[in-house]
Image: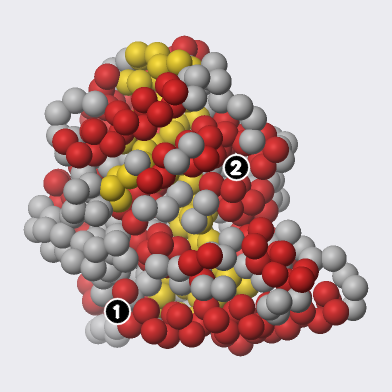
Amino acid sequence: MSPAAWTVASIRRALEAKTISARELTKEFYARISLENPRLNCYLALSPERAYARADAIDENFRRGESLPVLAGVPVAIKDVLSTRGTTTTAGSRILENYVPPYDCTVVERLETAGAIILGKTNCDEFAMGSSNENSAYGPVLNPAAPDRVPGGSSGGSAAAVAANLAVAALGTDTGGSIRQPGALCGVPAMMPTYGRVSRYGLIAFASSLDRIGPFAQTTEDVARVLQVIAGRDPMDATSAGAPVPDYLPASNQPVKGLRLGIPKEYYGEGIDPQVRKKTEAAIERFNRLGCQPVEIRMPHTAYAVPVYYLIATAEASSNLARFDGVRYGLRVNGANLSEMYRKTRGTGFGSEVKRRIMLGTYALSAGYYEAYYLKAQKVRSLIARDFAEAFKKADVVLTPTSPVPAFKLGERTADPLTMYLADIFTVPGSLAGVTAISVPCGKTAEGLPVGLQIYGPHFGESRVLQLARAFEAAGGFAG
């Protein structure tokens, strides 16, 4: 069976039927990675010793008569901002190029406990700061759908790995759209859980009040299966929620007839590529045929989301990245004194986009500007969250494009940071509000570029979001 055909369910059937072993499957994926990764640059580090040891343990336990765990033998890729014991974790930055964590993050522990095979670490924008994966210190990732285009960012390596069938599933992180936007641009389902639904322990932080971890997969069913494993309270993360985790698969199989679809006028104005608009409107019409009811809603503070995000996120980044000083771990460039060592280390280790955001955040937090910028941004953030709360009183979900444009060409926006930031205009509001969302494919442009539909749900409304996504997939919506 080719890698393109594997899903969580089909792997389980093959293992139970003994038509393939976990080791053989792992070997199959590594062979494909060796062929495709030099071109696509999805993976920064591989962990074959760990992967084969886990695969052999699964095979041996099954031979002894033990039942297979829920993700038995499933090859998974991990974004390189998630700590993995014994495997280099760089966050796409030179300042951490030789850093090897002594521990695993919670999500990796949970995946391996469930039987997943961790193949390696995927490329990403440096410290998850970017919308194109061109900010990585280790070179850009290419979009498997169009190698001259970006895969989206910052989790571009994870999205591309799944789209190119170099992993069955992958984990990414989303601060302002970094799971959903690359999922849309690469044409794979990609989910941002509610803030607090998944533990952030072991995540190299960008903006702590916004960062989330979520899955990519080829199907919404596999997204649900991976989310089931990684979700839930973790005592190692004080911000993880204690809300019960429902069984996502049965819940997401419920009929969607009668569900109310919020269509916000503010997300369908100027700036949307005509082909993206056409595909999104066709997706809404498909839901109409499934018996859903469109409801026009207003979200009046949407226009402020991008500036609010780039004040709050950069302020938190300025604080979080202060720890990378050359003293405790990571790169050190010696100087004549401590201050010079700091300057040389950070000047050499950080890329231009990370430096830009640190300076923006430091300015927003500085004396005399805190109330004018950061504090005001937090107040507007509350208004954006209120927009979502009001929307979910009138609708069960909110439907929007994921990205206003399909994948743009490599290098097209690197000289214009503002234009790059606007690529996240539809994803940032939900990040600020803390709600959940999934991006699912809804067809392709005339040039063959994937288009994504974003389905927003209320806090801890992952079941409802997956319910709509699975119905859309089953109705042929992914093909457009």
The CA span between labels 1 and 2 is 35 Å
Residue 155 location, x and y as percent?
38, 59
Q: Quadrant of residue 20?
A: bottom right
**Residue 279 visible to the viewer:** yes
Q: Quadrant of residue 23?
A: bottom right
> Answer yes or no: do the residues labelled 1 and 2 have beta carbons within 8 Å?
no
Amino acid type assigned to the residue bearing label 1 in the image? Arg
**Picture residue at 36% right of the left edge, 14% below the top:** 297
**Picture residue at 44% right of the left edge, 34% below the top:** 455
Figure quadrant of the N terminus: bottom right
Of 227 and 251, the residue lying toward us: 251
Circle 1 — which element? helix
According to the image, label 1 marks what residue? 39
- Residue 469's disc number: none
Decide if residue 321 is on the left or right side of residue 403: right
**Residue 375 visible to the viewer:** no
Q: Nearer the viewer, mark 1 or mark 2?
A: 1
Where 142 sits versus 37, above or below?
above
According to the image, label 2 marks what residue? 197
**Picture residue at 33% right of the left edge, 75% below the top:** 41
Residue 359 location, x and y as percent?
22, 54
The tag earlier along the polypeptide, 1 or 2, is: 1
Amino acid type assigned to the residue bearing label 2 in the image? Arg
Residue 211 location, x and y as percent?
45, 48
Structural crowding at the residue carrying mark 2, measured as other residues with C-alpha within 10 Å and reported as few (<14), some (14–19) or many (≥20): many
